Image (tube, helix red, strand yellow):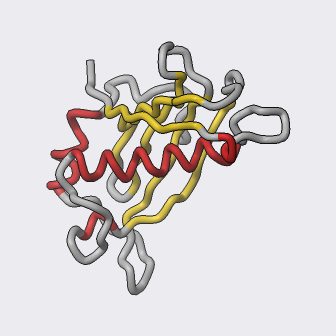
Amino acid sequence: MARFYETRFGVYFDDLDMFGILHNARYLLFVERALGEFWTTIGLGPFASEAHPDHQHLVRANHIEYDRPMVGVGEVRVRIQARKIGRTSLIMGFKVMPRDEDLPLAQGWRVLVRIDPVTRATLPWSDQLRALVTPYLDPNGGPDLPA
């Protein structure tokens, strides 16, 4: 089984909507923060385009499904796993879960595309990034991947 990266975030009063439920936009914010931690954990360092060329990428798509609500303040876990790495694209799967259960509150995937920062043309991912991400690659790809 492939590895995954997981981190925790606090859910505070200002993260909630008028019904006392974690606001839908916060899920992707937590995913964004978890991905930043993931890049650092696998050795790319903090986000700095000059430091590592693979940091120069754009989000092509986000897909998220909200499975059940997170009610009130507390803590969530975000689990990140690579789903598929192509020549210029990388699909990262994610699950947002409560602190004490492995059943997702929300789950989905994000497509990243490496680019040239000047021309914005797509570029292939480096061999270094491929080597760093491969241990986290789900051999099954995961559900509902784009073609």
As displayed, is residue 134 above or below residue 86?
A: above
Q: Is residue 14 left or right of residue 114?
A: right
Q: Position of residue 48 (x, y in %)?
A: 29, 71
Identify the residue shown where x is 27% and y is 59%: 125
Quadrant where the image shows the N terminus: top left
Q: Residue 100, position in %: x, y? A: 48, 15
Viewer-proximal residue among 7 and 53: 7
Q: How many marks?
A: 0
Query: Residue 147 appears at what percent x and percent y?
Result: 53, 41
Residue 129: give x, y in percent of width and height: 21, 53
Residue drawn 37% across the image and 64% down it: 114
Q: Nearer the viewer, residue 126 or 26?
A: 26
Residue at the far right in the pictured view: 18
Residue visible at 47% across and 38% down in the picture? 9
- Pick the residue in front: 100 or 130: 100
Looking at the image, residue 113 sits to the left or right of residue 28; the answer is left
